[in-house]
Image: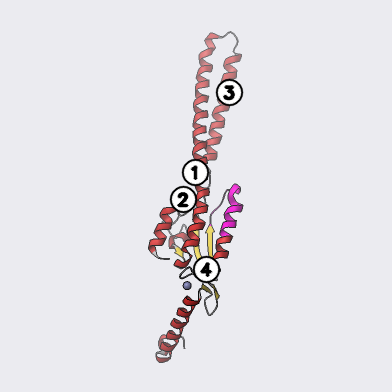
Amino acid sequence: MNPEKDKELCEKYPILYAQRDKSMQDTCMCWGFECGDGWARIIDELSAKIEDVNREILADQKRQWKIAEWLGTIGGFSLGASLGTIPLVQTPLIPILTALLSILLSWQGIRLSRRARDRCFVEASQVKEKFGTIRFYIGPVESKYDDRVYEWIDQAEEQSSKTCEHCGAPGKERSGGWILTLCDDCQKKRDAEYDKYREQSKHHPEDGLE
Ligand SMILES: [Zn+2]
């Protein structure tokens, strides 16, 4: 895919393509989108849907952090109140109950902040062409979202099987060496290039296949 479109997709969907600038030891996404420009629209539409899931997770995570913080504050306040009431009351029951409440609230706050920290965003690990269709590989997905995310990926793959990889026009699978999905015009260009190549190989067999 051309570098401008690659850059545009990564800027538009920063969570989904967070691995784009990582090293090849970490991810195959370092190679960029390994397919033709004709599929850019399919990838764009799929990315928009997945990035919406990521934004939902992000908003949810922020809410969890906020509630966790709030529970911690109330817990701390309640412990302070508990200690403060000791000299004022005759039975230690109220301070004990308040202290227990404080521990409970703080513990819930810690659990919630751990849950928020462990939230999992959907990240693409490789996007490429294989056997004439898009292959869109992602990392782990939270179970709440996995059905719909994988369904969208399947739909994009299906769509790519009917879309010219070079220009985005309606296309179909073409054999002849490497399987590609192309429209009639792009297939004609491909045939012409192949004929030219064969012709050149006849005259300079050392450069060609024959
Ligand atoms: Zn085409």
Where disc 3 sits, the SS reads: helix
Where disc 1 sits, the SS reads: helix
User: In the image, which is nearer the foreground, mark 2 or mark 4?
Assistant: 4
User: Disc 3 marks which residue?
Assistant: 101
Residue type for callout 4: Thr
User: Disc 4 marks which residue?
Assistant: 163
Write down the quadrant of residue 10 in the picture.
bottom left
Check disc 2: other Cα within 10 Å, few if <14, some if 14-19, many if 20+: some
* Mark 1–mark 3 distance (CA, rounded to whole Å): 30 Å
* Mark 2–mark 4 distance (CA, rounded to whole Å): 27 Å
**Residue drawn at point x = 45 percent, y = 55 percent:** 19
Q: Is residue 87 depicted above or below 187 in this figure? A: above
User: In the image, which is nearer the foreground, mark 4 or mark 1?
Assistant: 4
- Contact flag, marks 2 and 1 (Cβ < 8 Å): yes
Q: Nearer the viewer, residue 6 or 210?
A: 6
Q: Is residue 199 depicted above or below 101 in this figure? A: below
User: Disc 2 marks which residue?
Assistant: 15
Residue type for callout 3: Leu
- Contact flag, marks 4 and 3 (Cβ < 8 Å): no
Q: Which of 72 and 127 is in front in this view?
A: 127
* Mark 3–mark 2 distance (CA, rounded to whole Å): 38 Å
Q: Does the magenta stretch include residue 140?
A: yes
Write down the quadrant of residue 1 in the picture.
bottom left
Q: Is residue 1 depicted above or below 124 in this figure? A: below
**Residue stretch rendered in magenta on the structure:** 138-153
User: Disc 1 marks which residue?
Assistant: 58
Residue type for callout 2: Ile
Whether residue 183 is visible: yes
- Which of the two labelled residues, at mark 4 and mark 3, occupies the earlier sequence position? 3
- Which of the two labelled residues, at mark 2 and mark 4, occupies the earlier sequence position? 2
Whole-percent x and y of residue 67?
A: 52, 32
